[in-house]
Amino acid sequence: MGFVGLARLLVPALIGWALCGATIAIGRVATSLQNALIVHAIAAPVIFAAASLVYFNGFHYTTPLQTAIIYTSLVLVLDFVVVATFIEKSYAMFASILGTWIPFALIFGSTYLVGVYVVR
C-alpha cells in the first residue's frame, strides 16, 4: 500500500477523530461535562461506523480486524498526543472509563462490525 492507499485508510479515521473532538467541544459548551461524555460515547461508534463504511465500500486494503486496530490506535495516539498533551495539558482523561475507554471499545467494535458486514 502506497501513500494514496495509506491516505484512503487514514483520512476517514482522522475525520472521525475530528468529529468526535467536535462532539466533546460542543458538548462541553452546551451542557455539563458528564452529559458531553455520554453524548460522545453514543456518537463515537456512529461516527466511526460511517467512517468505516466509507473506507470499506471504497477500498478496504486491510481486513476488518486490522482496520479496527488501526482506527482505534490512531484515536488513542491522537488523544494522547494532541488532546492530553497539548490541549488539556493533563492525562487525567485516561482515568475516565466513560470519557476514553468506553468510546475506544465502541470505536473498535463498530469499525470491526461494519468491516465484517461490508466485506462479506
Image (cartoon, rainbow, N blue to C red):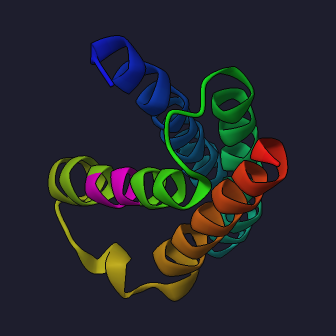
- Give x and y (percent) for residue 47: 71, 44
In which quarter of the view is residue 52 placed?
A: top right
Left or right of residue 120, residue 26 in this image: left
Q: Is residue 115 above or below residue 103?
A: above
| Main secondary structure along the magenta-highlighted residues | helix
Q: Is residue 5 above or below residue 61?
A: above
In which quarter of the view is residue 93 placed?
A: bottom left
Q: Is residue 73 above or below residue 67?
A: below
Left or right of residue 70, residue 106 in this image: right
Magenta-tinted stretch: 73-77
- Give x and y (percent) for residue 60: 59, 33
Q: Identify which residue, 79 or 68, lies in the foreground.
A: 68
Residue positioned 52% across, 74% down in the render: 99
- Give x and y (percent) for residue 57: 75, 27
Q: Is residue 79 above or below residue 11?
A: below
Residue positioned 65% across, 52% down in the render: 27
Q: Identify which residue, 107 or 19, lies in the foreground.
A: 107
Check the picture and name the quadrant holding the N terminus: top left
Which residue reaches farthest top? 4
Residue 76 in the magenta stretch? The answer is yes
Q: Identify which residue, 112 or 25, lies in the foreground.
A: 112
Which residue reaches farthest front? 120
Whether residue 30 can be seen here: no
Residue positioned 52% across, 69% down in the render: 104
Left or right of residue 107, residue 89 in this image: left
Residue 16 in the magenta stretch? The answer is no
Residue positioned 22% across, 73% down in the render: 91
